[in-house]
C-alpha cells in the first residue's frame, strides 16, 4: 500500500530553538499527504519538566518530578469526536502560539536529572492508527550580574591559619590569604587569583592548588539523593619548604561554557560553583582547604564601554555550550556504575 503520510513535522518560527521565559513559542505542525486521508484529530502538547532519577543497578532508588508547562490544544478535529475530517493530498499547515511562563528554569542535562522542554504532536486516524512526533526546544533563564547583589563585583577575600605538626616538637602555623578579583563571572571570562602562603611550620608543603569546581545536588522528596562534583579548571604549584613563602600573582582559571549558578525556578536540582584552594602537606597532616563560593551568570558586569546590552545575548550563548536536540528517553549514563560523590 502506498504511504499516505509523507511528512509530519513540528516547525518553530525561531529556528535557533532558543527561547527566554516570557517569550512566545510559535510555529506550525506541517503535514504532507499523498492521498485523501480521514483524520479524527491533530493534538498538540507542550511540556516542560524536571526529572530526577537515581538507579542502583537495574533498580530505581529515587525518583521525583516537577512540571513547569503542561499545555494541550487541539489543532484539528472536534472535542466530541463526531466524525472524521478528510484532508486532501498536498501540504497542510496548522499554526500554534503559546506564551511561555516568566519563571521557567533553564534547560539542563545531568547524570541523575534534567530540565527539558519539548512539544509533541499526535495525528489520529479512524482506524486507530496514531502518528506521533516531537521536537525539543531550549529555554535559557538568564542571570544578569548587574542586577545581582552588588558585592559580587568586589574582590573576594579569604584568610586561614592552620597548625601543622605538634607544637612541642617543632610544629608551626601555615597562613594563607587568597583574593579573587570579584565574586561573579560568566562563561568565557577568567578568574584572577592572588594568594600568599606563608609556611611558618617545620613541615614542608608538598603542593598548592586552585581549582574551579562544580557541585550538582539532586533532590527527591526534599532530600539530597545524589551529588556530582568535578574540577573544571586547575592551577597547581610546587613545594613550599619550612620557613618559606609562596606568592600567587594574577594566576587565572578559565570559566568554560556552563549553566548559571542554581536553576532558578527548579527545586530538584541545585548547581554551585566554588574556587577551592588546597594546601597539601608533605606528611600525614590533613589537607588544608579554603572554599570560596562564586556566582556564574549569563550577562557580565557592564563596563564604561558597554552601551547596548542587547549585544550580550549574541556573545554569551554562541560559545561551545551544547544543548540536546532529542528527548532524554534513553540515558545510558544512568546505568554507569561509577557514581561521583
Image (tube, rainbow, N blue to C red):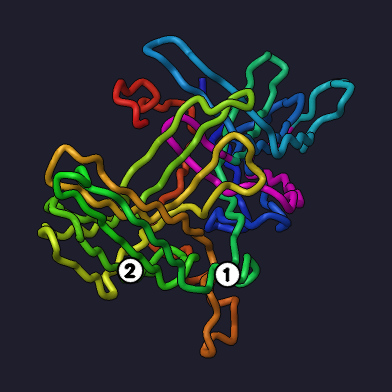
Q: Nearer the viewer, residue 126 or 15?
A: 15
- Label 2 close to label 1 by CB (< 8 Å): no
Q: Which circle's residue, 2 or 1, is located before the other in the chain? A: 1
> Which residue is label 2 attached to?
193
- The answer to whether residue 38 is magenta is no
Instruction: Tell me what residue is drawn at x 19 percent, y 49 percent.
Output: 171
> Which residue is label 1 attached to?
151
- In the picture as drawn, the residue positioned furthest to the top comes out as 59
Q: Tell me if residue 182 comes above or below residue 307 in the rendering.
A: above
For the residues labelled 2 and 1, the Cα–Cα distance comes to 17 Å
Instruction: Tell me what residue is drawn at x 37 percent, y 40 percent.
Output: 229
Q: Tell me if residue 95 comes above or below residue 82 in the rendering.
A: below
Q: Nearer the viewer, residue 262 or 206?
A: 206
Q: Secondary structure at mark 2?
A: strand
Q: Secondary structure at mark 1?
A: helix
Q: Position of residue 28 (x, y in %)?
A: 67, 48
Asked where in the image residue 22 lies, by quadrant, the reply is bottom right
Instruction: Tell me what residue is drawn at x 28 percent, y 49 percent.
Output: 163
- The answer to whether residue 96 is magenta is yes
Q: Residues within 10 Å of mark 2 (few under 14, many from 20)?
A: some
Q: Position of residue 276 (x, y in %)?
A: 35, 53
Q: Residues within 10 Å of mark 1 (few under 14, many from 20)?
A: few
Left or right of 9 in this view: 329:
left
Asked where in the image residue 120 lies, by quadrant, the reply is top right
Q: Which residues are magenta?
A: 87-116
Asked where in the image residue 142 lies, by quadrant, the reply is bottom right
Q: Tell me if residue 71 comes above or below residue 291 in the rendering.
A: above
Amino acid at each position: 500500500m502506498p504511504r499516505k503520510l509523507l511528512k509530519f513535522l513540528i516547525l518553530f518560527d525561531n529556528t535557533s530553538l532558543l527561547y527566554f521565559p516570557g517569550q512566545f513559542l510559535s510555529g506550525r505542525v506541517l503535514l504532507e499527504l499523498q492521498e485523501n486521508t480521514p483524520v479524527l484529530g491533530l493534538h498538540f502538547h507542550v511540556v516542560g519538566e524536571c526529572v530526577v532519577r537515581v538507579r542502583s543497578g537495574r533498580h530505581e532508588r529515587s525518583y521525583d518530578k516537577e512540571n513547569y508547562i503542561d499545555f494541550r490544544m487541539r489543532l484539528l478535529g472536534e472535542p466530541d469526536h463526531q466524525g472524521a475530517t478528510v484532508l486532501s493530498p498536498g501540504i497542510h499547515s496548522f499554526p500554534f502560539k503559546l506564551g511561555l511562563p516568566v519563571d521557567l528554569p533553564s534547560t539542563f542535562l545531568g547524570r541523575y536529572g534534567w530540565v527539558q522542554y519539548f512539544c509533541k504532536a499526535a495525528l489520529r486516524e479512524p482506524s486507530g492508527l496514531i502518528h506521533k512526533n516531537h521536537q525539543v526546544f531550549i529555554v535559557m533563564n538568564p542571570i544578569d550580574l548587574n542586577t545581582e547583589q552588588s558585592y559580587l563585583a568586589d574582590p573576594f577575600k579569604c584568610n586561614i591559619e592552620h597548625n601543622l605538626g605538634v607544637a612541642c616538637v617543632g610544629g608551626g602555623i601555615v597562613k594563607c590569604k587568597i583574593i579573587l578579583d570579584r565574586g561573579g563571572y560568566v562563561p568565557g571570562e577568567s578568574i584572577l587569583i592572588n594568594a600568599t602562603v606563608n609556611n611558618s611550620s617545620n613541615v614542608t608543603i608538598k603542593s598548592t592548588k586552585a581549582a574551579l569546581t562544580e557541585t550538582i545536588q539532586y533532590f527527591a522528596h526534599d532530600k539530597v539523593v545524589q551529588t556530582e562534583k568535578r574540577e573544571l579548571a586547575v592551577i597547581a604549584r610546587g613545594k613550599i619548604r619550612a620557613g618559606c613563602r609562596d606568592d600567587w600573582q594574577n594566576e587565572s582559571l578559565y570559566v568554560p561554557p556552563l549553566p548559571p549558578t542554581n536553576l532558578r525556578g527548579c527545586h530538584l536540582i541545585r548547581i554551585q560553583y566554588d574556587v577551592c584552594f588546597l594546601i597539601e602537606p608533605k606528611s600525614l597532616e590533613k589537607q588544608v582547604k579554603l572554599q570560596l563560593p562564586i556566582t556564574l551568570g549569563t550577562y557580565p558586569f557592564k563596563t564604561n564601554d558597554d552601551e547596548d546590552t542587547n549585544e550580550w545575548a549574541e556573545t554569551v550563548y554562541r560559545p561551545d555550550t551544547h544543548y540536546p536536540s532529542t528527548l532524554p528517553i534513553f540515558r545510558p549514563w544512568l546505568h554507569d556504575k561509577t557514581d561521583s560523590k
